[in-house]
Amino acid sequence: MTHFIIDPATTMGTVYLTITSMDRALRFYVDILGFRPQARQTGIVALTADGETPLIVLRAQPAARPRPAHDGAVPHRPARAQSGRTGTDAVAVGRG
């Protein structure tokens, strides 16, 4: 098995997710994974782990449909939020 090492200086930007139910998504990301809402607009919520950096922006579209499994998109696999992330990315809610 080949082991891959990611450079420690690598950072990840904000992840934008289209969801069908804001209530259900917030129960998962806030109640289970521990993210905190940082900013809200109608149908959009930015989530943070450190209180400053938006890591996930949820955009509610009730009629959204899942992508087919074979479309080549990277599957979303949630992971527990880690605080202390460094970076200077500034993200406005609603961009993306």
Image (tube, rainbow, N blue to C red):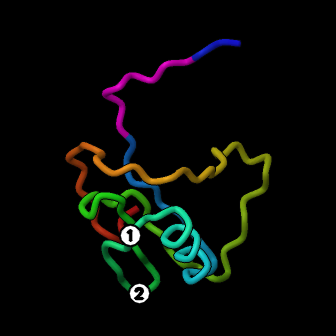
Secondary structure found at label 2 = loop
> Who is closer to the viewer here, 31 or 18?
31
Q: Residue at x 46, y 64 (%)?
A: 34
Three-letter amino acid code at the position of disc 1? Arg
Q: Which comes before the other along the chain, label 1 or label 2?
A: 1
- Would you name the residue on which mark 1 appears? 36
Q: Residue furthest top?
A: 2
Residue 3, x across and y down, in percent: 60, 15
Residue 53, x across and y down, in percent: 28, 57
> Who is closer to the viewer here, 60 or 87?
87
- Identify whether 42 is placed above or below 85: below
Q: Residue furthest left?
A: 88
Whole-angstrom CA distance, mark 1 to mark 2, is 17 Å
- Would you name the residue on which mark 2 appears? 42
Q: Residue at x 41, y 61 (%)?
A: 96
Secondary structure found at label 1 = strand
> Who is closer to the viewer here, 79 or 53?
79
